[in-house]
Amino acid sequence: MIPNLLEPAGWLPLFFLVAMGIAMVAYVVLDGYDLGVGILLNQATDEEKDIMISSIGPFWDANETWLVLGVGVLLIAFPMAHGIILTELYLPVGIMLAGLILRGVSFDFRAKAHLSQKAVWNFLFFFGSFLAAASQGVMVGREVIGFDSGGLGWLFAFIVALCLPAGYALLGAGWLIMKTSGGLQRKAVAWARKCLWLTALGVGIISIATPFFSAEIAAKWFTFPNIFFLLPFPVLSLACFVLIDLNLVKMQRDKPAPVWLPFALSVAIFVLAFLGIAYSMFPYIVVGKMTIWEAASATDSLWMIFWGAIVVLPTIIGYTIYSYKIFWGKTEPLSYY
Amino acid sequence: MLDALILSRIQFAANITFHILFPTISIALAWALLYFKIQFNKTGQIEWSEAYQFWVKIFALTFALGVVSGITMSFQFGTNWPGYMQTVGNIAGPLLGYEVLSAFFLEATFLGIMLFGAKRVSQRAHTVATFLVAFGTSLSAFWIIVLDSWMQTPQGFEMINGQAHATNWLEIVFNPSMPYRLFHMMTASFLTVTFLIAGISAYRYLRGINLAGSRALIKLSMTVAVVLAPLQIVLGDMHGLNTLEYQPAKVAAMEGIWQTTRGADAVLFAIPDEAAKANKYEVAVPKLASLYLTHSWDGEVQGLDAFPDTHPPVKPVFFAFRIMVGIGMLMLLTAFVGFYLVRKKHELPRWLLKTLSVMSFSGWVGVVAGWYVTEVGRQPFLVTGVLKTADAVTKLPTNMILGTLVMYLALYLGLILSYIWVVFYLARQTGPAKAADDARPNLVNRPIGA
């Protein structure tokens, strides 16, 4: 099933799988926190809403671009799978796109339209963010179980659809704890605690359900000595959840606690969950149906984009870091000049 | 009647039509903003700073709409046209990949600094960020036009087991129609923005807002338009001749020529009848089409009968072509009259200002009509001679496609109306004079490059 990895036809698809993984994780973490801020928007006062939006203003465009890169790599490197996956996910993709469009434009319209309309655009910003997150949840749920068409498969997808927005809201709350102060920061601590347990529920359900739906995946996790090497995944995730909660409780009691910790550990949870899913699925790109080598583009075409990717990806990461450094520190009101 | 093919085509057309409206503005507006900024840094005149501050808001809004509608495009290749990537993915993939890697990230990342970073970075870094956004936007356009042109006039590949494999990337990138389409589209973007700036400035002038600044922008736009409008007609003609060489069926549909003839007439107006294979109510100038297509009064022009099963639907191409040319002529006339009046008259006549403000979004009509000519004109192929549109379409149930189509159409209609409404709403604001105060020290004190 796995070809010779010393040949370009063997390792190039693997390289693009890793590149796609990096893009997906970057997307989930980066757009995750700004979608999360959108999901939490309705819980705040009007003044707080402005601060919340300001905290993500300089970043959201670039954050969403990682989604284009992720689906772009799928399209470029694995064209055979791109068609199958996106046809299977037709409806959630359509709804996610509508959500992303709504929130993207609401971000700009809310600041530019007449004041009387601001509330409408605020609501659409929240609604679009939730819609996009929930449909991404459905997509994850469908993909990890190989598009199982039974009722249980759909039930699973809908549970993930509720937990992923909670996970994004956790990231968003963690972001706000870092970037804001005073009353809003206190609120963010409370939001983070609520979201934490829904997120834990989601991670738990995915961990149990994936092996349940596929004997092959079950065999991968629960055989000796694999289980021994894989034990750190669930243990570390659990540790992250507990540490976040302890940290949040400290903040609620006004004891000194590092403001970056909840966000950083939430990111760690997402990365661990992603690695777990990636391990379960490998080497399939469509579980049980198509491996990455079966789905890969012609080796010549992969070479063509490989050279571009190894030059450009580090550059993108470099100027993304530069941009975050420029807007480092607590959020200030946005102005164009 | 409404099968997956026609619904997917309508859906894709709706998405791409909606999408192209916004890059058309942001490509050229980014360069206009860079120009305003450099002018202000050089001269210190407050008009340039006000122009920057007003138009950067419209730019931010336009850019956001472009980004979100562009994301939709990258998914639709897979959701509605799985056969496309499966057949030509080896070529389309890398081209799209370079677009995302080299351009999309550049513009999106530096946009944050350009819009919100003026106080946080040096003046030079801010100018560089503005330049990078403009450059990234144009680079993005380059890659997409390379891909579209390759689909129109493919070369540099071979077919192995029904899949296209690249043999020469230089031939793929510099395919025969690419340079013409690129320059025609870039000029279209600049003309659209020229008329948008002129129109909105005229609207503001009529309402007595920022008279000096509005007048300066009308003058600038008319000076640019008087150069670009004729240039665009020349570029369009060259593009047409290139199409005649590589896609003669498209030209036959544009011209409404049914039979291959020597000394073909130039049809000014008609209603093409596909069933009868003839034009009704035709108004034509004898032999003129042969003259401008072959540069000889008796040159032979291939008619639609030369391509019995592989010519595009005639009506949409024929009418879209006339709409595009009509807008082009209107712009040419307005540019010359406007240029003359802005130079000669101290007080701008109200009818000119009204005409300009009505024409604010006229570029959109021309650009969309032009893309309809070239894209519908490529039918029945998705990739000329390689892949038919009907063979690439998804096999999804029609009601699913219909459902998302209705959702997208409602969303797009609402957003276009909101966009136009907000642009005019912003134009009615009396200007950012107060907010500009805290910007001035930052903008004035450092000359460009310091």
Image (cartoon, coloured by chain):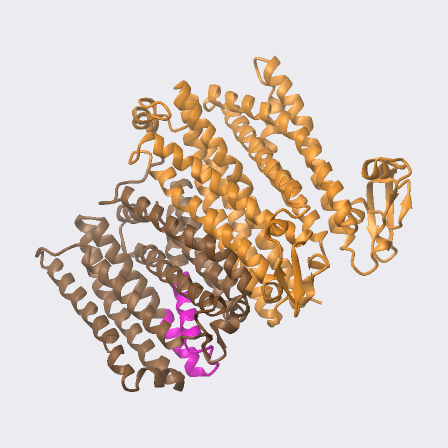
Chain colours: A brown, B orange
In what quadrant of the picture does the N terminus of chain B appear? bottom right
Q: In screen coordinates, is B255 left or right of B126?
A: right
Say which residue appears at 22% left-offset and 56% top-offset: A188
Rendered location of residue A283, percent (x, y): 43, 75
Q: Which of A332 and B422 is in front in this view?
A: A332
Residue B252 in magenta stretch = no
In the figure, A27 relative to B297: above or below? below
Q: Quadrant of residue A139?
A: bottom left
In the drawing, does residue B372 fall left or right of residue A159? right
Quarter of the C terminus of chain B within the rendering: top left
Magenta stretch prevailing secondary structure: helix
Residue lying at the far front in this picture: please name it.
A6
Q: In this view, does B300 lie to the left or right of A173?
A: right
- Could you tell me which residue is drawn at 38 percent across and 38 percent down? B115
Is residue A229 depicted above or below B400 in this figure?
A: below
Residue A166 at x, y percent in the picture: 30, 65
Q: Where is residue B319 in the image (x, y as percent from the top left)?
A: 75, 46
Q: Is A157 positioned to the left or the right of A243 in the image?
A: right
Q: What stretch is highlighted in magenta?
A: A132-161
The number of numbered badges drawn on the structure is 0
Relative vertical location of residue B184 with respect to residue A56 in this rendering, above or below: above
The residue lying toward the viewer, choosing from A203 and A151, is A203
Q: Is residue B74 visible?
A: yes
Instruction: Check residue A137 for magenta coloring.
Output: yes
The quadrant in which residue A143 appears is bottom left
Query: In the image, residue A335 lies at what x, y percent?
Result: 33, 37
Any part of residue A114 in sight: no
Given residues A252 and B157, the one toward you in this image is B157
